[in-house]
Amino acid sequence: MMHERFEMALIIPFLYNSSFYEKIGVKKYAGEVQYFQRKSIRSNRLNEQNENLWKNEEHGLVRCLELLQGYRKNLSLHNNENCTYYLENKKNILFKISKVKGWFFKGGEGYLTLDIRAVNMDEKNVLDLRAMLSDIKAKKRICYMIKTGKDETDEKIFTIKEVLQNFLGMIKQMEPKVQKENSLKALTLSYGIVEELNPATSGIYFEKLRLNADGSSRISAKIDSNFLYQLEKYPYINWVVSEESIAGTADMRQALEIADKNGDFLRKSLGPAIFRDYLMVYLYYINLNTRTAELEKQSREAANNICVYPAMRTIRHLQQQLVMLTNQIHINTLFYRYLCTNVWNLPERLGRLEETSENDVFISYRRKYGGYPARLIYNKLKESGCKVFYDYKSMRMGDFNIQLKKAMKNGMYVVAVLTPGCLGEDALGEQENYMIKELRYAMEPCNEIRVLNVFVDGFSFPKQLPEGLENMDAQHGIYMDAENLDSALERIVEIVKRG
């Protein structure tokens, strides 16, 4: 099966200091060389409610930089995008590396993408090329040699890992970090155009695509129908979806049988659409999967008392981002239904994280004075998706200090419901004033717990504050009474969810 055309986006993950996000493509540092140009992220396939995720300067979550052609040598590439490369041990596998881009997500996740292109390549070489380039830790060597004069040549030998390291060196002011050596692997998004799919051999080829298998390795001819998809709009394109790759193979004969115009679509329009629309959507979901995996790791470590469980608001934020991004049913089906749901199983994994998540908020109040406003705050926070610690009766059955430390964790908010008399002289004399104990623990300098004061029904601080709460009146505060009840509750939710 010969590919008339094969194109692939090689996607290599890295991390960077997210505090630099707002400066990406905007600010030039003193003495900095301008290696990149900011690329606007445009697509007419994004649905309206999600356009701001990409385009809005203030609320957008990703920015893209494209390497300027004159600096390709800094990555060990030839400056000419039409330069032909080959694998050192596979000299018959010829390809080109065109655009080089860096994608920076707001949370500190980054992706280097290399556009790989080849023509007239058989299926074995396609599989070899994809498998060898994506296995970065294997350090497969890439070569090019160009004659520059009568007796002169320009030649270079390098690895994809070296390209990544050189790229990170060019953005060193962003404090980038690479994955651990033993887990460094690229993802791929690719498509190929063949004259006609051979029914006798295409099944084995698709199975190898799914496993990212080396084309020279043996493999079972058994086909698992759960990974091979033909979308209704383009039945002549077979999609293979797996953990680390998405690959489409277009059958030209079948396409032309449906309509002559399909030939032009495959040769002229499919490639640009995949490297723009499909790649944008794929990176978005890759990032969600990466962040989910990080929370799962945190949850496993929390089970061994190494750290705290992920906060509910963090999990809910990811759940809210797990949406269909485009107005194109076939793209949503491929990425949301098959990749996110069938292959990565993101909805179920986030649901399991939700069950073991850490509280976002601890509500501290005096039962004698503040039970009703505390209940209103609790209900509002729960409606907004926060996980709230509110039932203190169970805490008071055992050792209060031990239970308090388990319930009140670093990074959470303590909402102090301050009602008249709750911190006054009568409160100071009570041995069982749990509210004061809770606030005293929250405000210990060694704890990273934020306190949000809610002033109810004209509360004012007493002249003498309880020991350990001397700085209580310096904390952020919101006034809540019958007249501004709704707006005060909304403001509490906004502050807590903003973190």
Image (cartoon, rainbow, N blue to C red):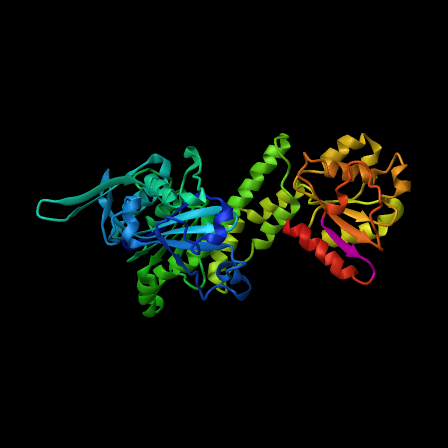
Q: Looking at the image, is 35 positioned above or below residue 398?
A: below
Left or right of 55 in this view: 194: left
Residue farthest toward the front in the current orientation of the protein = 463
Left or right of 345 in this view: 258: left
Left or right of 29 in this view: 393: right
Which residue shows up at 45% across the image and 50% down it?
104
Residue 50 spot, x, y in % from top left: 53, 61
Which of the two residues, 156 or 450, is positioned nearer the viewer here?
450
Which residue shows up at 12% across the image and 45% down it?
152
Is 481 a magenta residue?
yes
Give, as a single range, the part of the protein colored magenta: 476-482
Can residue 339 be seen here? no
Can residue 70 be seen here? yes
Which of the two residues, 241 or 161, is positioned nearer the viewer here?
161
Is 426 a magenta residue?
no
Q: Looking at the image, is 315 positioned above or below residue 281?
A: above
Residue 320 spot, x, y in % from top left: 60, 54
Residue 223 spot, x, y in % from top left: 42, 46
Residue 161 spot, x, y in % from top left: 35, 39
